[in-house]
Amino acid sequence: MRTATETPLLAVDDLHVEFRTRAGVVKAVNGVSYSLNAGETLAVLGESGSGKSVTAQAVMGILDTPPAAVTGGQIRFKGTDLLQLSEEARTRIRGEGIAMIFQDALSALNPVFTVGWQISEMFRVHRGMSKRDAMKKAVELMDRVRIPAARERVNDYPHQFSGGMRQRIMIAMAIALDPELLIADEPTTALDVTVQAQIMELLAELRRESGMALILITHDLGVVADVADRIAVMYGGRIVEHAPVHDLYRSPAHPYTRGLLESIPRVDLKGRELHAIAGMPPSPLDLPGGCAFHPRCPYRRAACASDVPPLYQVGWTRGSACHYWREVLDAGRR
Ligand code: SF4
């Protein structure tokens, strides 16, 4: 259980990130705050351009070169603000403290080295192990991420594996140094539905076994229901709703979340009509004034176009950036 005095493993506080492009300043992240305790799983949900991946890249410290600029806020990992650390100190935290896996495993793996070589490199470089011992650890890790016949396949090249198996290899590399936090950025998007479920199950299992915390970044509300403890929903570079996963599914407190839920098929609500959210997500180059969701929002009133909603506290454990969250919550309970 969390106590009031416990220091979160990760606390992102009022983070702002911009990209200075020739077309203008892209305000990708506009005051994002969230925190995560050891062993928790947070799903960060949003459409493309919502700022979800950029926030994670800022946490990982792989965004600190132009045109990207972290223009404000703090990212505290075990109480230390990562934005104040030297590059050397951040490199140490990457891999051992925080690790990340990406959507496209094929381009993240080097095609000219065997997978065993690539996994074992983590142990040679970070732990100073001999080639032989590091290779033994690579086989152990391939077993751990359930790659069949790991001993025989350790000398195969990435192209000899299926998409799902390549993603398992990426996961093996990410967990090699026992990170306390794993960030998985759309880890199943390029995979078919059955393999998606297997990868999510593997991540959940590894989290349970190791006690690491997990941030799952996704655009698909359907894939995180069974895995996440909490969900943060992003829109226009901000968090518009956060809640324990079951509360959010049962009764969303933001019209955008409600729209997302109404657009996914559910076996328990057979025969229900599906609704797509009207319109398109805004360009981060030209965010609407007031509430960024107002051009698409069925609940909007005049004030929505001018007054930016703060993240209102909804009960003890939830937040919604909607002026009319009570109405949305009540509509969901009907
Ligand atoms: Fe919709 Fe207004 Fe709420 Fe924004 S603040 S989500 S426009 S009702």
Image (cartoon, rainbow, N blue to C red):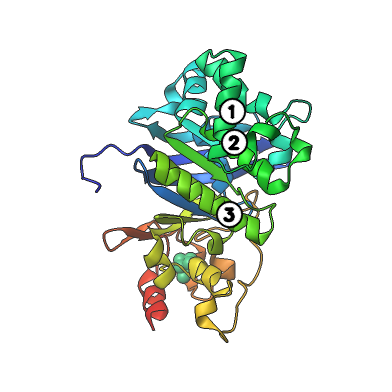
Q: CA distance from mark 1 to mark 2?
A: 6 Å
Task: Indicate which disc, 1 or 3, sits on the residue closer to the N terminus.
Answer: 1
User: Is mark 2 in CB contact (under 8 Å) with mark 3?
Assistant: no
Q: CA distance from mark 2 to mark 3?
A: 15 Å
Identify the amino acid type marked 1.
Ala
Across and down, in percent, residue 273 comes to 59, 84
Along the viewing direction, whichever of 326 and 194 lies nearer the viewer? 194
Along the viewing direction, whichever of 300 and 307 lies nearer the viewer? 300
Q: Is residue 161 left or right of residue 77?
A: right
265 vs 47: above or below: below
User: Is mark 1 in CB contact (under 8 Å) with mark 2?
Assistant: yes
Residue 138 tag number:
1
Residue 88 tag number:
none
User: Is mark 1 in CB contact (under 8 Å) with mark 3?
Assistant: no
Residue 142 tag number:
2
Q: Is residue 215 left or right of residue 135?
A: left
Q: Quadrant of the C terminus?
A: bottom left
Along the viewing direction, whichever of 169 and 272 lies nearer the viewer? 169
SS state under label 2:
helix
Residue 198 tag number:
3
SS state under label 1:
helix
Task: Indicate which disc, 2 or 3, sits on the residue closer to the N terminus.
Answer: 2
